Amino acid sequence: MTLEGRARVLGDDVNTDYIISSRRKRETIDASVLKHYLLESIDPRFAASVQPGDLLVAGANFGCGSAMEVAATVIQAAGIRAIIARSFARSFYRNAINNGLLAVQCDTSSIEEGNRLSIRFVEGAATVHDRTRAKVMQASPMPAIMLRILEEGGLVGFLSKYGGWG
């Protein structure tokens, strides 16, 4: 599996309420509507600037806060294919994988806004290549079952295909 895209850089401790505001979720939880408000409390222009295939890059503790699934699905609805972060909140990480959103953990400190990145998995081992700076970063390995879930588009697709954990 290989993904390529433009880096959209955020800082540390981006919580789920920053990803999609609670006041927006009172109106709807439809990710196709909420994508227009993605990260608006950090940058009101962010959602309008997202291009299909963009990759979110964050510091430590991405997705902290409440364990709402819509935080992951609104990122996907905006056309973002993956998140690369120094670390993830456990509940966000599981929600991302279960919904087919790639979440890669590695040192992101050298990645800058707009850099061209590629993510590559070979037998569970991932590398993030910053093509702009010609730098390769080793990512934390991902268990084979998680890669299989991602390949099927998420947990529902996986269970539909395999009927269990087969």
Image: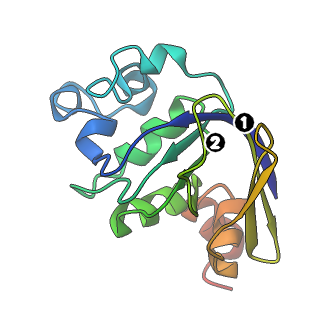
The three-letter code of the residue at mark 1 reads Gly
Specify the quadrant of the image occupied by residue 67. Answer: bottom left
The structure residue drawn at horizontal position 82% and vertical position 53%, both measured from the top left corner, is 2
The x and y percentages for residue 30 are: 37, 31
| Residue type of the residue flagged with mark 2 | Arg
Give the residue pinned by disc 1: 5
64 up-or-down from 11: above or below: below
Question: Is residue 74 shown above or below 24?
Answer: below
Residue drawn at x 62%, y 83% as measured from the top left: 165
Where is residue 99 drawn, in percent x and y?
A: 52, 54
Left or right? Give the position of 115 relative to 83.
Answer: right
Residue at 26% across / 26% down in the picture?
41
Residue at 64%, 33% (x, y): give it.
54
Q: Give SS at disc 2.
A: loop
Callout 1 touching callout 2 (CB < 8 Å): yes
Query: Tag 2: Cα neighbours inside 10 Å, few (<14), some, or many (≥20)?
Result: many
Q: Quadrant of residue 93?
A: bottom left
- Mark 1 Cα shell of 10 Å, populated few (<14), some (14-19), many (≥20): many
Marks 1/2: CA–CA distance = 8 Å
Q: Is residue 123 above or below residue 93?
A: below
The quarter of the image holding the C terminus is: bottom right
- The circle drawn on residue 162 is none
Image x and y of residue 106, in percent: 58, 64
Residue occupied by mark 2: 81
Image quadrant occupied by the N terminus? bottom right
Total marks shown come to 2
Give the structural element (helix, strand or loop) at label 1. Answer: strand
State left or right for residue 130 relative to residue 45: right
Which is more N-terminal, label 2 or label 1?
A: 1
Whether 136 is drawn above or below 30: the answer is below
